[in-house]
Amino acid sequence: MLELEAPALGDVIEDRLAQEEMFAEVPRDASGLSLFRESLDEAMAGTTDSDRFDPELLETIQGWADVLSRGITEIEFTNAAGTVTRIAQSQLERAKRLRRETPPVQRVRVTGWLDAIRHHDRMFTL
């Protein structure tokens, strides 16, 4: 068993969460670990239209097959509220299928007016 703790994102990066349109779905009391667990839930459920995971996370999940092939039957993530996410070998096929179906990362060019560049928090406004 490995126990991890992480601070709430609202306590750590409140100013970055202020960009409401970009982080509207992120509760202020969520931590990076809770968002990771939610991403796992959606990936293990086979949710194809999720914004919570990308090809790299799916590839990481697939990598757990090595751990699950060594006598470990499942990997379990539990949050402070007691919500449990379990990952077994059979579920890794979903991650593999999602990885195949997920479009590759693409570079894009965003254009607009640069309104501000701030050094103190490394942010900019377009």
Image (cartoon, rainbow, N blue to C red):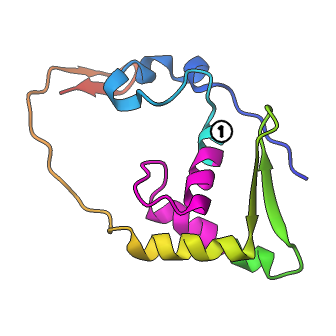
Q: Is residue 41 magenta?
A: yes
Q: Amino acid at mark 1?
A: Ser
Q: Residue furthest bottom?
A: 69
Instruction: Give the main secondary structure, helix, strand or loop, of the magenta stretch.
Output: helix
Which of 5 and 30 lies nearest the eye of the viewer?
30
Mark 1 residue element: helix
At label 1, counting other C-alpha atoms closer than 10 Å, the crowd grade (few under 14, some 14-19, many 20 or more) is some
Q: Is residue 95 above or below residue 108?
A: below
Q: Residue at x 59, y 66 (%)?
A: 60
Q: Is residue 58 magenta?
A: yes
- Residue 94 placement: quadrant: bottom right
Q: Please provide percent x and percent y for residue 86.
A: 76, 58
> Is 88 on the left or on the right of 3, as rendered?
left
Q: Which residues are magenta?
A: 37-63
> Is 82 on the left or on the right of 49, as rendered?
right
Q: Is residue 9 above or below residue 48?
A: above
Q: Which residue is mark 1?
A: 34
Q: Residue at x 82, y 67 (%)?
A: 74
